[in-house]
Amino acid sequence: QRIVLASNNQGKVREVGQILKGQNMEVLPQSAFAIPEIEETGLSFVENAILKARNAAAHSGLPAIADDSGLEVDALQGAPGIYSARYAGPGASDADNNAKMLQALEDVPDRERSARFQCLLVFMRHAEDPVPVICQGTWNGRILRAPQGENGFGYDPLFFVPEKNCSAAELPAREKNAMSHRGKALQCLLEKLANG
Ligand code: ITT
């Protein structure tokens, strides 16, 4: 089954490809089609994921998977949340966002630096699919005081994983995918697709 992945984020595309490898589906990146960018105008992860999946399905004629994700920091009342990709402003790089995060938490002690990644996945059989398949994954950790590690993408160098005693960017891809918000949401999606 050919499916388009509605994402322009190389880190996400890589991880989704790794996790879905060996499944009976060919996941094509959005860049393989002329899919126009849409504005993420939703006020929740799930709304934005639906907007992206519908757009990709409409312009590719294929079923689509979209991933809307982000980092919720308790000391920042859940920010940057759905605005994680552009925390430091429009077109911000991962480095810009991480620098802004470290600055925002400068005076916050270790015990108050809890955070979690959220991943909302939406699968739509076609653009007008009235019953999209929706899955969520969460990953708990806390925000470090300096970046550590080179793997992964986004906020991974700042995200401390207590079970592994290292940052998400210090985990090999296989280990991150086995426990991450994205890994959990994709496992849920595979189960739902297999059962229905
Ligand atoms: P697409 O919409 O094209 O998929 P995007 O990067 O704009 O790409 P989002 O709006 O969902 O996607 O923003 C997600 C942001 O959350 C992403 O840019 C990272 O900064 C962060 N993020 C999500 N998952 C992450 C992960 O596994 N590790 C580190 N940061 C992550």
Image (cartoon, grey):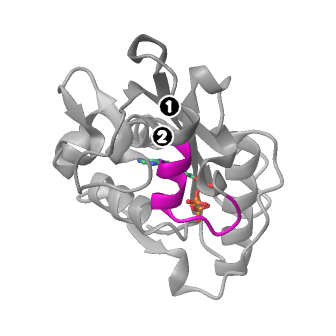
The residue closer to the viewer here, 144 or 4, is: 144
Q: Is residue 179 above or below residue 53?
A: above
Q: CA distance from mark 2 to mark 1?
A: 6 Å
- Give the residue drawn at x 23%, y 58%: 22
Tell me the kind of residue under disc 1.
Glu
- Secondary structure at badge 1 equals loop
Image quadrant in which you'd find residue 144: top left
Can I make out residue 12 in this image? yes
- Give the residue drawn at x 23%, y 56%: 150
In magenta segment, residue 38: no
Tell me the kind of residue under disc 2.
Leu
What residue would you read off at disc 1? Answer: 106
Could you say where residue 177 lies in the image, as x and y percent from the top left?
Answer: 28, 44
Q: Main secondary structure of the magenta part?
A: helix
The residue closer to the viewer here, 100 or 122, is: 100
Looking at the image, residue 112 sits to the left or right of residue 45; the answer is: left
The residue closer to the viewer here, 158 or 122, is: 158
Q: Is residue 75 above or below residue 1?
A: above
Looking at the image, residue 76 sits to the left or right of residue 111; the answer is: right
Could you say where residue 28 lies in the image, as x and y percent from the top left?
Answer: 45, 74
Looking at the image, residue 173 sits to the left or right of residue 130; the answer is: left
Looking at the image, residue 13 sits to the left or right of residue 165; the answer is: right
Question: What segment carries the magenta color?
Answer: 89-101
Answer yes or no: disc 1 within 8 Å of ligand 1.
no
Image quadrant in which you'd find residue 52: bottom right
Can I make out residue 137 in this image? no
The residue closer to the viewer here, 40 or 16, is: 40
Image quadrant in which you'd find residue 88: bottom right
- Give the residue drawn at x 54%, y 37%: 71
What residue would you read off at disc 2? Answer: 102
